[in-house]
Image (spheres, helix red, strand yellow):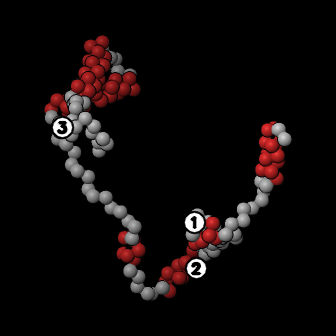
Amino acid sequence: MTRQSDEDEVWRQIVASFNDTAERDSADQPWPDSENIPVEPTRRVVKPPEEEELELEQDDEPRDEGDDEDEGHFEPPPPPPLPKLDLMTKLAWVALFGGPAYLLVAAMANWQMEGWALFTAVAAFIGGFVALVVRMGDGPPSNDSGWDDGAVL
Protein backbone atom coordinates (compact mmCIF):
# COMPACT_ATOMS: atom_id res chain seq x y z
CA MET A 1 0.00 0.00 0.00
CA THR A 2 1.05 3.52 -0.57
CA ARG A 3 1.35 6.14 2.08
CA GLN A 4 -1.72 7.98 0.75
CA SER A 5 -3.94 4.90 0.92
CA ASP A 6 -2.81 4.23 4.52
CA GLU A 7 -3.79 7.77 5.49
CA ASP A 8 -7.13 7.40 3.69
CA GLU A 9 -7.85 4.18 5.58
CA VAL A 10 -7.01 5.77 8.93
CA TRP A 11 -9.22 8.73 8.06
CA ARG A 12 -12.14 6.42 7.19
CA GLN A 13 -11.75 4.66 10.56
CA ILE A 14 -11.77 7.97 12.40
CA VAL A 15 -14.90 9.14 10.59
CA ALA A 16 -16.66 5.79 11.10
CA SER A 17 -16.01 5.84 14.85
CA PHE A 18 -16.91 9.51 15.34
CA ASN A 19 -20.30 8.90 16.98
CA ASP A 20 -19.27 5.79 18.93
CA THR A 21 -19.30 6.15 22.68
CA ALA A 22 -16.21 5.31 24.62
CA GLU A 23 -16.46 2.17 26.74
CA ARG A 24 -14.60 2.74 29.97
CA ASP A 25 -14.48 1.05 33.29
CA SER A 26 -14.87 3.14 36.38
CA ALA A 27 -11.22 2.30 37.07
CA ASP A 28 -10.22 4.00 33.81
CA GLN A 29 -11.87 7.30 34.76
CA PRO A 30 -9.47 10.04 35.80
CA TRP A 31 -12.02 11.36 38.31
CA PRO A 32 -14.08 9.85 41.15
CA ASP A 33 -17.56 8.45 40.50
CA SER A 34 -19.11 11.14 42.69
CA GLU A 35 -18.20 13.72 40.04
CA ASN A 36 -19.96 11.94 37.18
CA ILE A 37 -22.86 13.87 35.68
CA PRO A 38 -26.18 12.01 35.93
CA VAL A 39 -27.70 10.81 32.67
CA GLU A 40 -31.01 12.52 33.39
CA PRO A 41 -30.90 16.21 34.24
CA THR A 42 -31.94 16.99 37.77
CA ARG A 43 -35.26 18.73 38.06
CA ARG A 44 -35.87 21.62 40.37
CA VAL A 45 -39.19 22.22 42.02
CA VAL A 46 -39.97 25.90 42.36
CA LYS A 47 -42.51 26.64 45.06
CA PRO A 48 -44.79 29.65 44.85
CA PRO A 49 -43.93 32.44 47.33
CA GLU A 50 -47.01 31.68 49.46
CA GLU A 51 -45.81 28.15 50.22
CA GLU A 52 -42.33 29.40 51.12
CA GLU A 53 -43.79 31.88 53.61
CA LEU A 54 -45.92 29.16 55.19
CA GLU A 55 -42.87 26.91 55.58
CA LEU A 56 -40.91 29.73 57.18
CA GLU A 57 -43.72 30.44 59.65
CA GLN A 58 -44.04 26.75 60.55
CA ASP A 59 -40.33 26.34 61.11
CA ASP A 60 -40.05 27.35 64.78
CA GLU A 61 -36.82 25.44 65.30
CA PRO A 62 -33.97 27.85 66.13
CA ARG A 63 -31.13 27.77 63.65
CA ASP A 64 -27.51 28.52 64.17
CA GLU A 65 -26.92 30.49 60.97
CA GLY A 66 -23.57 31.87 62.08
CA ASP A 67 -21.83 28.57 61.33
CA ASP A 68 -23.19 28.35 57.79
CA GLU A 69 -22.40 31.95 56.90
CA ASP A 70 -18.86 31.92 58.27
CA GLU A 71 -17.89 28.73 56.49
CA GLY A 72 -15.72 29.55 53.50
CA HIS A 73 -16.06 33.30 54.01
CA PHE A 74 -12.86 35.27 53.76
CA GLU A 75 -12.58 38.74 55.16
CA PRO A 76 -9.34 40.41 54.13
CA PRO A 77 -7.35 42.37 56.67
CA PRO A 78 -7.68 46.15 56.54
CA PRO A 79 -5.38 47.74 53.97
CA PRO A 80 -2.32 49.62 55.14
CA PRO A 81 -2.65 53.40 55.32
CA LEU A 82 -1.75 55.45 52.28
CA PRO A 83 1.72 56.98 52.32
CA LYS A 84 2.01 60.64 53.27
CA LEU A 85 2.76 62.87 50.29
CA ASP A 86 5.06 65.83 50.44
CA LEU A 87 4.02 69.27 49.16
CA MET A 88 5.76 68.95 45.78
CA THR A 89 4.00 65.67 44.98
CA LYS A 90 0.62 67.11 45.94
CA LEU A 91 1.22 70.16 43.72
CA ALA A 92 2.24 67.90 40.83
CA TRP A 93 -0.99 65.90 41.14
CA VAL A 94 -3.07 69.09 41.32
CA ALA A 95 -1.32 70.45 38.21
CA LEU A 96 -1.72 67.14 36.35
CA PHE A 97 -5.47 67.02 36.86
CA GLY A 98 -6.20 70.73 37.37
CA GLY A 99 -4.99 71.91 33.95
CA PRO A 100 -7.22 69.59 31.89
CA ALA A 101 -10.10 70.06 34.36
CA TYR A 102 -9.96 73.84 33.84
CA LEU A 103 -9.91 73.40 30.07
CA LEU A 104 -12.85 71.00 30.18
CA VAL A 105 -14.96 73.25 32.42
CA ALA A 106 -14.12 76.32 30.32
CA ALA A 107 -15.05 74.53 27.10
CA MET A 108 -18.34 73.21 28.51
CA ALA A 109 -19.30 76.61 29.93
CA ASN A 110 -18.31 78.44 26.70
CA TRP A 111 -15.96 80.74 28.58
CA GLN A 112 -13.76 83.03 26.56
CA MET A 113 -10.25 81.69 27.17
CA GLU A 114 -7.31 84.03 26.99
CA GLY A 115 -4.07 82.81 25.48
CA TRP A 116 -2.17 83.00 28.74
CA ALA A 117 -4.86 80.91 30.56
CA LEU A 118 -4.75 78.25 27.87
CA PHE A 119 -0.95 78.20 27.97
CA THR A 120 -0.95 77.98 31.79
CA ALA A 121 -3.40 75.05 31.82
CA VAL A 122 -1.39 73.07 29.24
CA ALA A 123 1.91 73.94 30.96
CA ALA A 124 0.49 72.85 34.35
CA PHE A 125 -0.52 69.49 32.87
CA ILE A 126 2.85 68.88 31.25
CA GLY A 127 4.76 70.16 34.29
CA GLY A 128 2.76 67.99 36.69
CA PHE A 129 3.37 64.92 34.55
CA VAL A 130 7.10 65.58 34.26
CA ALA A 131 7.40 66.26 37.99
CA LEU A 132 5.69 62.99 38.90
CA VAL A 133 7.82 60.99 36.46
CA VAL A 134 11.04 62.55 37.75
CA ARG A 135 10.05 61.92 41.38
CA MET A 136 8.99 58.34 40.64
CA GLY A 137 12.35 56.98 41.74
CA ASP A 138 12.85 54.22 39.20
CA GLY A 139 16.35 53.46 40.37
CA PRO A 140 17.94 50.23 41.53
CA PRO A 141 16.64 48.65 44.75
CA SER A 142 18.18 49.94 47.96
CA ASN A 143 19.08 46.51 49.35
CA ASP A 144 21.89 44.55 47.73
CA SER A 145 20.46 41.08 47.12
CA GLY A 146 22.85 40.03 44.38
CA TRP A 147 22.70 40.19 40.63
CA ASP A 148 19.27 38.53 40.36
CA ASP A 149 16.38 39.98 42.35
CA GLY A 150 13.98 37.27 41.20
CA ALA A 151 10.31 38.00 41.61
CA VAL A 152 9.92 41.33 43.36
CA LEU A 153 6.62 41.53 45.22
Looking at the rendering, in which quadrant would you find the C terminus? top left
Query: SS at mark 3?
Result: loop
Q: Badge 3: how crowded within 10 Å, few (<14), some, or many (20+)?
A: few
Helix, strand or loop at mark 2: helix
Please name the amino acid that badge 3 sits on: Asp
Residue type at mark 1?
Answer: Trp
> Does 42 sit above or below residue 10?
below
* Quarter where residue 20 is shown: bottom right
Which residue was labeled with disc 2?
A: 51
Q: Mark 3 = which residue?
A: 144
Residue 99 percent across, percent down from the top left: 29, 25
Q: Residue at 77%, 53% (x, y): give it.
A: 18
Residue in view at x 38 percent, y 65 percent: 73
Does any portion of residue 128 appear in the rendered image?
no
Q: Amino acid at mark 2?
A: Glu
Residue 26 in sight here: yes
- Against 131, residue 148 (above or below) is below
Q: Earlier in the sequence, mark 1 or mark 3?
A: 1
